[in-house]
Every structure is written in structure tokens, then in C-alpha cells.
Image (tube, rainbow, N blue to C red):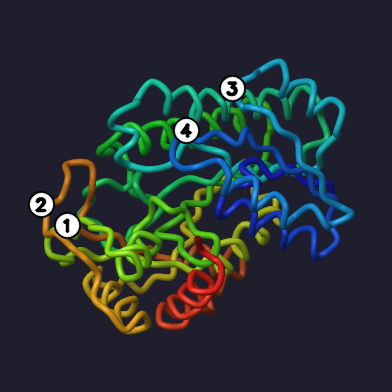
């Protein structure tokens, strides 16, 4: 299968591209290597780890460049798309809402239009986020939740793209599967996310805010489990579906902090702060639909995943 992986130089995208290449798919990665959320050198480093695969190639391009997307799809003739490229991060979205809508919603439409124009795309898998659930009272989070009370522009743009995908399925027959990521962590993780920030704090003394004293729950999901779910979605055209890809077992943030501190043998430099308006207190995935439709079965416990992350960080992180 010839697969396009957008955001292939990103954290999750690079893991996904490697997994697909390892199993023998013809993989084309696409990334614009921007430094809006974090230093682009990390993205170039991830791209270098993919370069040895003979069945992988990277294209540097921006999904907001509509004509370039139409050209790439026409030339490459993809059979499936795993669309992970996005501006991520809740707090940056509050600062730059127009940019997030341009990339995460309009950029997604460019890819769908290019897929339809080129033909041959049998399945389009779109990476969304648990942030679309907002402060829902339905816990664990279930895919039938209306998700119409999102808390910030990142989630709003992602939810908009989910809805647009349904219209493209309804009107044009595009197989469109939404996979909602929960709190993904692991080796090569983003430096703006909590796991990496804590590792930096315990090793370098960098001060990190701990919202609500760590009394917030996150459904920490190891990156290999997440990418297993994406691969399963790519292999199963389902018409239009929304599917949670979490672990289904939320962990108290304070307990996650303690795991990192124990492995490091020292305390993090934390400062207690109130929860920002863009954040929620709890997220937990109902993964029964993923189990049923995708055979999804997350295998890595939080304790094991944190151990793997810490070993990677201690050995390789600058």
C-alpha cells in the first residue's frame, strides 16, 4: 500500500512512518518542518532516522499550500492517507487562533480535495484530539458525545475538520476515519509536553507549572499503542467513523510526576498554578469502539511507558 503520512517529522508521525515502512508499505512523508511550537531541528533529526528506509521518502511542503497538495497527490497516486500534520498545543492556539484554523481545518480540506481530485485514495485517516470533548460530563469519553462545547481554537479546528470529513464522505464517498488521540507520550516526545518538561525539570532544574497541584487526570497513552491504532484504521476503510485511541485508564498527574522523579532520583522544580481556562480536569477514553472496529488493544502500561521514555531521554536528549 502506498501511504502518505503528513506530519511525518513530528513525534507521532515519525513513529507511524517507521512502523509502516518496517512492515513494507511504500511511505511518503510530508512535513513543513516549522518551528512554531518547538525547534525544527528536532524534526530534522527525526527525519534522519527515517532516511535509511528504502521505501520511505520525505517531501518538505505545507498543507496550507493548496496547489502544491493537488500536485503532490496527482504525482504520487496515494492509496491511503494518515493525516497527522497540525499545529498542536492548547495554549499556543489561544495565542494564534487564526493560524490554527488555517492549518488544522483549512489545511485538512486541501488534503481531502487533493485526494478526491487525484483519485485512488481508498482511506483517509484523520488525527484528532481528546480536547474536542471539552468539559463533558460523560466519563469515560464516548464518541457519540456532541463535542459542541470545545474550550479553545485547537479543539475547535479539529472538531471542524471532523465534521467536514463527514460531509466529504456523504457527498463524495471518501472513507474518512477520525482517530482521537489522548495524552500520547514516549521516545522522541515533543519538548512542550508534560513528560518532556518534567524530564527537563528533574535534570536541569527548569521550573515547570503544576496545575491544580497535579490533581488532574490524563489518559496517558504510549506512542506505540497509538500508532498501532492508526495502522489498524488505515487497513480498515469504514465509511465514516470517529474512534478514540486512548488507554482507557486515567492517571493522576501528580502520580505521573512521581514516576519521573523516582526514575531520576531527584525532585522536579514545580510551581503550583491554577488550571488555565483552556484545560480540562479529566480525560478518559472509552476504547470499546476501537477494540470492536480496529482490534485495538493497548499493551504498554503507564509505568512501563514512563520507564521507556526516561531511558530514551537519559540516553539521547540534549
Q: Which residue is mark 3?
A: 64
Q: Which residue is mark 2?
A: 274
Query: For residue 211, which numbered disc appears in the image?
Result: 1
Q: Residues within 10 Å of mark 2 (few under 14, many from 20)?
A: few
Q: Is residue 300 above or below residue 184?
A: below
In this rendering, which labeled residue sits more in front, label 1 or label 4? Answer: 1
Name the side, left or right, on which 161 lies relative to 269: right
Q: Residues within 10 Å of mark 4 (few under 14, many from 20)?
A: few
Query: For residue 163, which numbered disc appears in the image?
Result: 4
Q: Which secondary structure, mark 2?
A: loop
Mark 1 → mark 2, Cα distance in angstroms = 5 Å
Q: Residues within 10 Å of mark 3 (few under 14, many from 20)?
A: some
Pick whichever of labels 1 and 4 is earlier in the sequence: 4
- Contact between marks 3 and 2 (CB within 8 A): the answer is no
x and y percentages locating residue 232 in the rendered image: 66, 61
Mark 3 → mark 2, Cα distance in angstroms = 35 Å
Pick whichever of labels 4 and 3 is earlier in the sequence: 3
- Contact between marks 1 and 2 (CB within 8 A): the answer is yes
Residue name at image x 83 percent, y 46 percent: 2
Residue name at image x 56 percent, y 26 percent: 107
Mark 4 → mark 3, Cα distance in angstroms = 19 Å
The image shows a total of numbered marks equal to 4
Pick whichever of labels 1 and 2 is earlier in the sequence: 1
Q: Which secondary structure, mark 3?
A: loop
Mark 1 → mark 4, Cα distance in angstroms = 32 Å
Amino acid at each position: 500500500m502506498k501511504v502518505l503520512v503528513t506530519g511525518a517529522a513530528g513525534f507521532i508521525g515519525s513513529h507511524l512512518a517507521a512502523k509502516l515502512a518496517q512492515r513494507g508499505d511504500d511511505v511518503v512523508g510530508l512535513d513543513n518542518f516549522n518551528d512554531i511550537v518547538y525547534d525544527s531541528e528536532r524534526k530534522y533529526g527525526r527525519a534522519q532516522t527515517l532516511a535509511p528506509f528504502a521505501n520511505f521518502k520525505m517531501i518538505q511542503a505545507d498543507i496550507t499550500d493548496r496547489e502544491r497538495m493537488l500536485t503532490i497527490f496527482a504525482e504520487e497516486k496515494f492509496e491511503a492517507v494518515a493525516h497527522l500534520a497540525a499545529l498542536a498545543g492548547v495554549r499556543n492556539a489561544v495565542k494564534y487562533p487564526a493560524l490554527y484554523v488555517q492549518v488544522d481545518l483549512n489545511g485538512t480540506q486541501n488534503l481531502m480535495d487533493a485526494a478526491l481530485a487525484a483519485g485512488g485514495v481508498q482511506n483517509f485517516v484523520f488525527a484528532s484530539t481528546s480536547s474536542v470533548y471539552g468539559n463533558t460530563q460523560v466519563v469515560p469519553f464516548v464518541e457519540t458525545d456532541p463535542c459542541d462545547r470545545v474550550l479553545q481554537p485547537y479543539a475547535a479546528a479539529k472538531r471542524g475538520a471532523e465534521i467536514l470529513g463527514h460531509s466529504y464522505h456523504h457527498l463524495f464517498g471518501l472513507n474518512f476515519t477520525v482517530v482521537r488521540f489522548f495524552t500520547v507520550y514516549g521516545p522522541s516526545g515533543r519538548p512542550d509536553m508534560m513528560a518532556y518538561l518534567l524530564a527537563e525539570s528533574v535534570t536541569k532544574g527548569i521550573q515547570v507549572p503544576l496545575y491544580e497541584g497535579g490533581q488532574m487526570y490524563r489518559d496517558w497513552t504510549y506512542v506505540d499503542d497509538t500508532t498501532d491504532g492508526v495502522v489498524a484504521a488505515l487497513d480498515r476503510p469504514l465509511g465514516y467513523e470517529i474512534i478514540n485511541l486512548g488507554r482507557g485508564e486515567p492517571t493522576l498527574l501528580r502520580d505521573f510526576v512521581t514516576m519521573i522523579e523516582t526514575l531520576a532520583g531527584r525532585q522536579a522544580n514545580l510551581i503550583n498554578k491554577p488550571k488555565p481556562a483552556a484545560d480540562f480536569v479529566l480525560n478518559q477514553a472509552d476504547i470499546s469502539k476501537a477494540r470492536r472496529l480496529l482490534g485495538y488493544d493497548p499493551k504498554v502500561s503507564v509505568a512501563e511507558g514512563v520507564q521507556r521514555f526516561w531511558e530514551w531521554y537519559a540516553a539521547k536528549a540534549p
